[in-house]
Amino acid sequence: MGGGSEIFDLTGTVVAIEKRFMLPRLLVFTVLANVPACSACGGPAEPIPTAKADRHVRRPVDEVGYTHTAEGIAEVVEFALGAEQHRFAENNQLRGVGPDDVFAAGISPHDDYQYAQQVYAHLYPHIRASHVLVIGVAHKARNFPEVEGKLVFDSFDAWHGPYGDVEISPLRADLLEALEPGGNAIVHDELQSIEHSVEGLIPWLQHFDRQVQIVSILIPYMSWERLAELADRTAAHLQRAMEQRGMILGRDVAILISSDSVHYGDEGWGGKDFADFGVDRQGYDRAVERDLNLVRDYLVDQVSRTKLEQLYRLLVQEDYHEYRITWCGRFSVPFGLAVLEALPPDTGKPHHDGVLLRYGTTLDPGRHDPGVEGLGVTAPASLRHWVGFVAIGYR
């Protein structure tokens, strides 16, 4: 387990027992915590601390594409920041993004660090809020029809972070209290436990703020009308909770949207062909150009509900279970930005604005190894199989 487990590194054993015998995780931890130490099997010589065992902590599921240790994420961040110095200067000069700018929201990749670290690096130094709503993708929602058309929350006490557990923001309870009774939200730890689109963002968040607290919300299949309704409800309840708690958007609360862009090629996609423009260099360039056009036309400058609906309809079929364009953030991006659009900016401006910080693919900037032990990639990168991703900040 990256970063080590507090209970003699038995996380893998716990998960195996939990799945094999369908036992609650807390019961498994309790039983294992009372097993006597065994010198022959390398067990601990001292009594096992049980304080952590009483917590329901969401553990990482991807130990390859991400690093979940303090040393690992520090190395990744340092490597990425160093590699992007010239682009930081370019963004400052051409886009007016300075090192002290604070974003109220952002779109972040969730792809493997070796591919996307240089894109992550442009967003996270600007997320300064101590409470972050992480709007994630529900990649496996098809397996859980009960979540369709609802916001998917978790009930964990904390999420594993490289510098210690990441606590849950009290905003989760505020939102669930308002949304769940009307059937607008569901608590679904199983889906949250197997979804990687949130866990990859947490090391970056915690690296820049050791005290950050989160709310994880996954966005499964839903129509535009349902998505817009839920965004309005969420924004209204969030605004009320922020006022009651004396929180300000950007300073205290941020919205972080998880999304990779186009998934392209004709190999390694479960038998599906996502190569709209072919699999040569010209096809790659045309697919990248389409991604950049979607960003330019719908995701930067003024955030508007009209543009978000247009983006949704470009990405999603009328049967919203199917893609038009293979962006995995086809629901998370319109939802997260619709929530942002419904919240008043703290800047005194009439609307929120987005600025493109960095676009990349698994071929460009491509794979760069920061030298972290155990850090690898979970998918190949070639003209027949590649992924795009973007970092966008919103004021």
Image: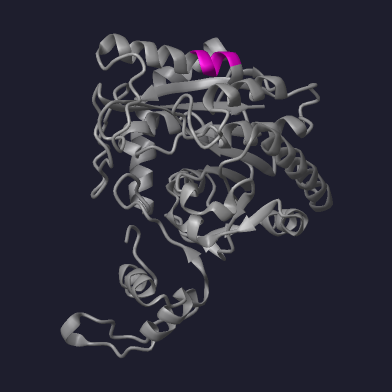
Q: Is residue 71 left or right of residue 123?
A: left
Magenta-colored segment: predominant secondary structure: helix
* Image: 74 above or below 56: above
Residue 368 percent across, percent down from the top left:
26, 31
**At 59% across and 63% down in the image, what residue appears?**
155
Q: Is residue 324 magenta?
A: no
**At 79% across and 32% down in the image, what residue appears?**
344
Taking depth in this image into account, of 326 and 28 the one nearest to the observer is 326
* Image quarter (top left, top right, bottom left or bottom right) of the C terminus: top right
Residue 104 percent across, percent down from the top left:
66, 34
Q: In the picture, residue 174 is in which quadrant? A: bottom right
**Can residue 249 be seen at all in this image of the molecule?**
no
Query: What segment carries the magenta color?
Result: 293-297
Residue 197 percent across, percent down from the top left:
46, 44
Residue 198 percent across, percent down from the top left:
49, 47
Query: How many numbered callouts?
Result: 0
* Image: 44 above or below 348: below
* Image: 376 above or below 28: above
* Image: 161 above or below 335: below
Taking depth in this image into account, of 248 and 16 the one nearest to the observer is 16
Q: Is residue 296 magenta?
A: yes
Q: In the picture, residue 249 is in which quadrant? A: top right
Residue at the far left: name it. Answer: 40
**Can residue 41 be seen at all in this image of the molecule?**
yes
